[in-house]
């Protein structure tokens, strides 16, 4: 261990101890031992649902308003890329910019890190959980790479020849033509680059490891070698362990088909990644969206882990589905036993607009009235059902919930004669209808009160 590493470990341990003493006993997000498909916080199971209008929310000038709105409607989950690409005009880089326009990778920009620390503090105060993406893939390609401090032409710390990094990368990230992502020892072992990458991650962890409400995803839609993500997952977990805390990591791959072998390094290695992000499945629509996710739940059944959806695509304004697609994907994910669901930012998602807010609020209204953490997806209990007509999650003999994307009628098998009470939820109005007591029967007909988005709770 070198001197800098030793100082970092001691500093993190001190910061973590100080934070725990200020806030009482430290609470951390952990996998729920009774049902590893879900998370717990402070020992209590939690369902993560949310939305926001930006990916790197710590840079958003209306951060407080976004968090307050999310909290008010029952949301508790955001995505936070460590991105600094200048899309909206308010973003800043992590490094000090010198008078000649170049960056010094040995000097920080306090504004960037103050914003990050503020986001962590405010989300912690509101019990809003943060899924960090450490390396925002698209920052390192095309026009964003041209302006990035890590680009050799933009810093005083190394040249293109010394680093082996390109000064131009005009291709899409799926081409993997920026060897910035090949610096780790089991690939090109570009130590002059790796030391600055480590320094960036160390700085991030000096803030984030103080808090227990943070999850770590290595990349966004990556197509690079698995060794890159393996390295950073181990690096982050090792730093956390040295600081006396435990964290959870994952990787997000690019391919939309979750059965593609590109996803194997995550699905097949629970010893490396303690949860999975399956956001790319949210490019799928209708029944296929449900079926693909359920295949993966079966795949990992022997070593069940939370399946997170930090990005749900679908908005009339974008290219990845409609408003309806976004809303349906949100509900199918939760009814499909997923641990989280968050609307992607505009234009590709609904963000935190009024439609997203209604869905988040109604989802919380429903799940607060049931023990979803001991339920399982149970479309097998539905009959007279068309593809994509209705979706069921249930703890048979105790309670059932059924989601209807656009009205309809199905029959629910109760497996034994029993009397039940139905409560219909008008999702877009966030309103319950009066309860209905059904006479004892082994099955019941569920007829939506009308067209549109409905859920029904049967207990």
Image (cartoon, helix red, strand yellow):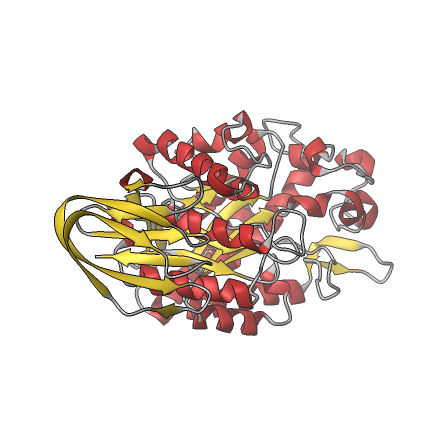
In the visual, does 149 lie left or right of 287?
A: right
The answer to whether residue 221 shows anywhere in this view is yes
Which image quadrant for residue 284? Answer: top right
In the visual, does 209 lie left or right of 384?
A: right
In the visual, does 85 lie left or right of 326?
A: right
Relative image position of residue 236 (x, y in whole percent): 49, 44
Residue closer to the observer: 85 or 233: 85
Please tell me which residue is depicted at 34% across the width and 44% down the height of the picture: 37
Relative image position of residue 333 (x, y in whole percent): 43, 47
390 versus 41 height, above or below? above
Quadrant of image for the C terminus: bottom left
118 versus 310 height, above or below? below
Relative image position of residue 146 (x, y in whole percent): 81, 47
The answer to whether residue 128 shows anywhere in this view is no
Please tell me which residue is depicted at 67% across the width and 48% down the height of the picture: 319
Relative image position of residue 298 (x, y in whole percent): 36, 32
Please tell me which residue is depicted at 37% across the width and 48% down the height of the picture: 335
Residue closer to the observer: 220 or 295: 295
Q: How many marks?
A: 0
């Amino acid at each position: 261990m070198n001197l800098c590493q030793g100082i970092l470990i001691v500093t993190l341990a001190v910061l973590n101890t100080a934070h725990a003493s200020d806030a009482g006993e430290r609470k951390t997000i952990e996998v729920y031992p009774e049902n590893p498909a879900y998370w717990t916080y402070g020992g209590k199971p939690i369902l993560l649902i949310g939305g926001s209008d930006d990916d790197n929310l710590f840079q958003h000038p209306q951060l407080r308003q976004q968090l307050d709105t999310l909290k008010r409607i029952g949301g508790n989950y955001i995505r936070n890329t460590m991105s600094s690409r200048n899309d909206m005009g308010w973003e800043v880089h992590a490094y000090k910019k010198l008078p000649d326009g170049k960056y010094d990778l040995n000097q920080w920009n306090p504004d960037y890190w103050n914003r990050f620390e503020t986001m962590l503090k405010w989300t912690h105060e509101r019990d809003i959980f943060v899924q960090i993406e450490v390396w925002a893939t698209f920052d390192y390609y095309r026009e964003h790479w041209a302006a990035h401090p890590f680009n050799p032409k933009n810093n005083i710390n190394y040249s293109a020849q010394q680093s082996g990094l390109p000064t131009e990368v005009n291709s899409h990230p799926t081409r993997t033509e920026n060897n910035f992502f090949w610096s780790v020892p089991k690939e090109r072992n570009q130590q002059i680059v790796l030391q600055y990458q480590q320094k960036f991650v160390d700085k991030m962890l000096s803030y984030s490891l103080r808090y227990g409400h943070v999850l770590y995803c290595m990349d966004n839609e990556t197509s690079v070698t698995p060794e890159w993500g393996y390295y950073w997952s181990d690096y982050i977990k090792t730093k956390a362990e040295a600081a006396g805390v435990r964290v959870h990591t994952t990787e997000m791959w690019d391919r939309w088909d979750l059965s593609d072998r590109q996803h194997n390094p995550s699905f097949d290695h629970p010893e490396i990644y303690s949860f999975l992000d399956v956001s790319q499945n949210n490019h799928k629509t209708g029944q296929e969206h449900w079926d693909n996710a359920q295949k993966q739940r079966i795949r990992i059944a022997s070593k069940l882990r939370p399946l997170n959806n930090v990005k749900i695509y679908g908005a009339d304004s974008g290219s990845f589905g409609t408003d309806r697609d976004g809303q349906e994907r949100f509900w199918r994910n939760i009814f499909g036993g997923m641990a989280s669901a968050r609307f992607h930012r505009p234009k590709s998602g609904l963000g935190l607009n009024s439609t997203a807010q209604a869905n988040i609020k109604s989802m919380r209204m429903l799940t607060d009235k049931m023990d979803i953490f001991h339920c399982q997806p149970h479309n097998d209990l539905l009959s007279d059902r068309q593809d994509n007509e209705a979706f069921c999650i249930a703890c048979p003999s105790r309670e059932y919930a059924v989601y209807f994307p656009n009205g309809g009628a199905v029959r629910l098998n109760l497996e034994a004669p029993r009397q039940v009470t139905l409560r219909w939820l008008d999702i877009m109005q966030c309103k319950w209808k009066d309860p209905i007591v059904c006479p004892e029967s082994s099955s019941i007909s569920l007829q939506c009160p009308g067209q549109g988005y409905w859920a029904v709770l049967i207990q």
